[in-house]
């Protein structure tokens, strides 16, 4: 497996442009199953998860042309409304095909999902919602089997603000007969983006971005062309990396409102973050101030930025408390930070981070996607050389990250087939 070798100690300087949002692209590609024509999507990032999605759609019979940043999907000849274990185990977002398949074909067989090992993340809200719309659900041999001649509108109360659950049910309801209400829906920008695309396809959805979404089902959707929004988590990662290294970086293409919670915490840490015509500029000098963070559904501080913020707080002048309220197993990066000299103590859902003057390079192992980004930031600021193994996690969510950071002055090289296992 590949590893990254990072020589730390260089402030990042220059301009970097944000790629398209992975967490918007994945459900939008799944939405192409709702129509029988060719959909064209632009600003699609070249990521491992996108390759997995393309393979899944091809397995079903769709024609998929991948030429990043453009992807074209024609789902006019779906032969197999099934998502097999070998593909779904690689990426939890594969479950997003469940709603579209049942809505358009009346049947779906989808393996229970995999992906990063950061918590249980059950799909009970997805299944509860589909059952409320009339689907018959069977769970056996590790698969969800859902059937319904035609879904019908329903009022669905979500017990938690699940992003993929909201997206799956919104896609299913787009072709259901009658009106559906999703109460307690997720409000993330990626949910809004999916609704925007579905409406361009002819759906009738309002309220996306609030906790109550209304969907009036239609008989048919048509193909669409659409450019994916920028990736707010990638943008936040670059902002934090620049701040940690004491750099001066303009992050272009970002939607400022999407990353305001991250920017607020950076400003509290003493970092300058200002809007410019083409993006957000971050400047930092010296060690940051300690800043507590509690993760929460949007518009709160995103769980996908928790690990990166911890890397910054490892250098703070004082102690900060980072509380993880979304996933129960999202501190796996802490043991790797310890190897680099960080002082972090786990107390239940909280991490007590006491800043140190410097981190030291070490051999560490990535355990999930955002933990990988945390270790990259730590490596950028550490004395000496850091080797990060299992960076396939990183490749799931960051496009050519070593090349793009190197353009800002970082010293990162990729070693094929190397690393600690």
Image (cartoon, rainbow, N blue to C red):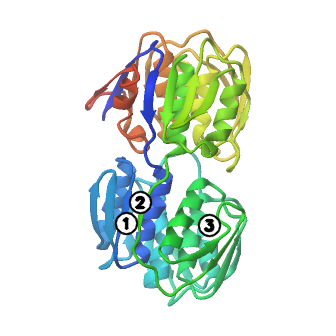
Residue named by callout 3: 124
In the displayed orientation, state which residue is furthest to the bottom. 149
CA distance for labels 1 and 3? 19 Å
Q: Which mark is residue 98?
A: none
Residue named by callout 2: 88
The percent coordinates of residue 227 (x first, y second) are 43, 57
Q: Residue at x 61, y 65 (%)?
A: 166
The percent coordinates of residue 253 (x first, y second) are 48, 42
Sequence order check: which comes first, mark 3 or mark 2? Answer: 2
The percent coordinates of residue 385 (x first, y second) are 40, 14
Task: Judge the density around disc 3: few (<14), some (14-19), many (≥20) Cα neighbours within 10 Å.
Answer: few
Rendered view: 247 above or below 37 = above
Rendered view: 292 above or below 51 = above
Sequence order check: which comes first, mark 1 or mark 3? Answer: 1
The percent coordinates of residue 402 (x first, y second) are 36, 29
Give yes or no for contact between labels 2 and 1 (Cβ–Cβ under 8 Å): yes
Which of these two is toward me, 178 or 140? 178
Q: Is residue 329 visible?
A: no
CA distance for labels 2 and 1? 6 Å
Q: Residue at x 38, y 40 (%)?
A: 399
Residue named by callout 1: 84
Rendered view: 104 above or below 410 = below
Q: Quadrant of residue 177?
A: bottom right
> Quick one: quadrant of the N terminus?
top left
Q: Quadrant of residue 350?
A: top right
Which of these two is toward me, 323 or 256? 256
């Amino acid at each position: 497996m590949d590893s990254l070798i990072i020589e730390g100690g260089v402030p990042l300087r220059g301009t970097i442009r944000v790629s398209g949002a992975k967490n918007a692209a994945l459900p939008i590609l799944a939405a192409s199953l709702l129509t029988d024509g060719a959909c064209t999507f632009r600003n699609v990032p070249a990521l491992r998860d996108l390759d997995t999605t393309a393979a899944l759609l091809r397995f079903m019979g769709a024609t998929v042309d991948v030429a990043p940043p453009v992807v074209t999907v024609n789902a006019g000849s779906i032969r197999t409304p099934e998502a097999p274990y070998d593909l779904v185990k690689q990426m939890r977002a594969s479950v997003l095909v469940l709603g579209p398949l049942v809505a358009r074909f009346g049947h779906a067989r989808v393996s229970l999902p995999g992906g990063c090992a950061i918590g249980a993340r059950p799909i009970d809200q997805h299944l509860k919602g589909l059952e409320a719309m009339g689907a018959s659900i069977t769970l056996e041999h590790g698969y969800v089997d859902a059937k319904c001649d035609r879904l019908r509108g329903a009022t669905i109360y979500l017990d938690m603000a699940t992003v993929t659950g909201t997206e799956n049910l919104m896609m299913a309801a787009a072709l259901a007969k009658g009106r559906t209400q999703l109460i307690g829906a997720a409000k993330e920008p990626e949910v809004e983006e999916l609704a925007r695309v579905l409406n361009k396809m002819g759906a009738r959805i309002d309220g996306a971005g609030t906790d109550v979404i209304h969907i009036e089902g239609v008989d048919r959707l048509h193909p669409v062309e659409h450019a994916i929004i920028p990736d707010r988590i990638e943008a936040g990662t670059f902002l934090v990396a620049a701040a940690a290294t004491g750099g001066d970086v303009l992050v272009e293409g970002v939607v400022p409102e999407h990353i305001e919670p991250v920017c607020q915490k950076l400003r509290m840490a003493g970092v300058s973050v200002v809007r410019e015509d083409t993006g957000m500029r971050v400047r930092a000098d010296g060690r940051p101030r300690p800043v507590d963070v509690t993760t929460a559904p949007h518009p709160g501080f995103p769980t996908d930025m928790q690990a990166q913020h911890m890397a910054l707080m490892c250098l703070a002048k004082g102690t900060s408390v980072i509380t993880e309220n979304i996933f129960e197993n999202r501190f796996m990066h802490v043991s790797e930070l310890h190897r680099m000299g960080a002082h972090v103590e786990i107390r239940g859902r909280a991490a007590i981070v006491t800043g140190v003057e410097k981190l030291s390079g070490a051999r560490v192992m990535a355990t999930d996607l955002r933990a990988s980004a945390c270790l990259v930031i730590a490596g950028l600021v550490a004395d000496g050389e850091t080797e990060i193994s299992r960076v396939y996690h990183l490749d799931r969510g960051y496009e050519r990250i070593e090349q793009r950071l190197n353009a800002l002055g970082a010293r990162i090289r990729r070693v094929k087939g190397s690393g600690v296992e």
